[in-house]
Amino acid sequence: MSSSLRLLAHIAIPLLLSSCAPPLTFMVSPEAAQVASLVEQAAKGTKGLEGLVFLPDTGPWPSKGLVARLTSTPRWNLPAAVPAVSPISASALPPAYAPLPVFAALGRSSDGSWSALPLFFDAVGFEAYYPAGSAVPPDLPNWDQIGDKRWEGQLALPGGLPSCRQAVFFLGESSLKSPILDAGNWFSQFDADWRAGLARVPEWTTSTAWAPSTWTFTPGDLAVWQKPGSPYVFGTSYRSFEISRGGDPRRFAPWLRRYESGQTALAGTVLFLEVYDGGKAPKQLEPLLRLLCSPDFQKQVGVRLKWMAVSQSTAEIDGDSAVVRDAARAAFRFFPLADRLPQSIPSNNLMGEIQAAFNYAKKR
């Protein structure tokens, strides 16, 4: 064989193999759809992602190939038959990925790999409008202060949301002794270890801090009162606070729970990346990881969509995000929340039991 033929064969064989490689599919939960749109735009000019396939995770599972899933509920809201989760090796992550310690503790396994890689987060909190003509920021309570008489009847929540109920439940726990599992098992855990907390739900729903009927409210139900001069402090999230910003000055602070030990906890939604292929995640995933972990891409997600970056390498969105990330930096625990519950919740599932406990509890 001539040298020119040998060269052509040397080039053609890898091309043939690459053309036959199974596709990389990026499956996206509804709550992450806007982030996926930015990924799709960026992927068009990114080497190794030209053929990336985008699908909603509400549809059929791909029959072959590697699947990367962006979701707030790892291992949940999935079809009955899916491959095993493949751990994401720490060595596959770019150096720019430097998670806040509270998220590293949540997602990383003992061998350093990740069954669910946290990328972006939101945090529940309180907001209040400045009094008319005042330049003094309005007061906002820490979570452990809501029982004070100062807040009687003033806290209005979208209490019908599963995430709001979950936040009250987890932050209402009197200690940190209850277990928190890794993110890959968090939403599928049984309720047995939390029975004492479930029994205390009526104590939280009847607190004098809450505005009447707040446990049935949605965000839309609060809108009529969200204006300057309102007597209420509103439960919301950082993203909701930022996205709804108008000309009226408001202040936001995360729900920060302080324990007797001095440790703190927060709660909110986290967007995780999972990988499904029944084995170790291959090098095919690395271009996608580089994109998702890029500080430039994460800053774009923050500025445009108001998701805060888990990685400390990414700059702050604004002063309010800096306050939240400082609180997360100092926190011992971050409780992941989800508004997207499966249509059929498995029996003895903690998230389902939380929802039911609030449904049937006595309320103000």
Image: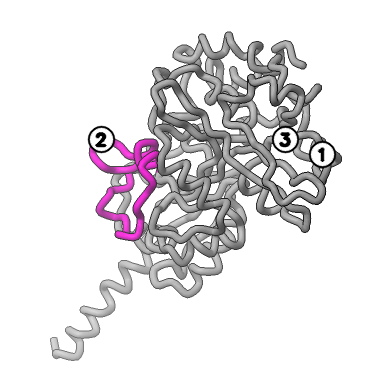
Q: Quadrant of the C terminus?
A: top right
Q: Nearer the viewer, residue 205 or 270?
A: 205
Q: Which label was assigned to residue 233?
A: 3
Please state which amino acid type lies under the numbered disc 1: Ser
Query: Marks 3/1: CA distance?
Result: 8 Å
Residue at 32% over, 59% down = 94
Q: Which residues are magenta?
A: 87-116
- Are the residues at dot 3 and dot 1 in contact (C-beta closer than 8 Å)? no
Please state which amino acid type lies under the numbered disc 3: Val
Residue 195 part of the magenta segment: no
Q: Which residue is mark 1?
A: 230
Sequence-first tag of 2 and 1: 2
Image position of 163 (left or right of 220): left
Q: Which residue is mark 2?
A: 110
Near mark 3 (Cα within 10 A), the count class, few <14, some 14-19 or many ≥20, is many
Residue 100 image point, x, y percent: 38, 46
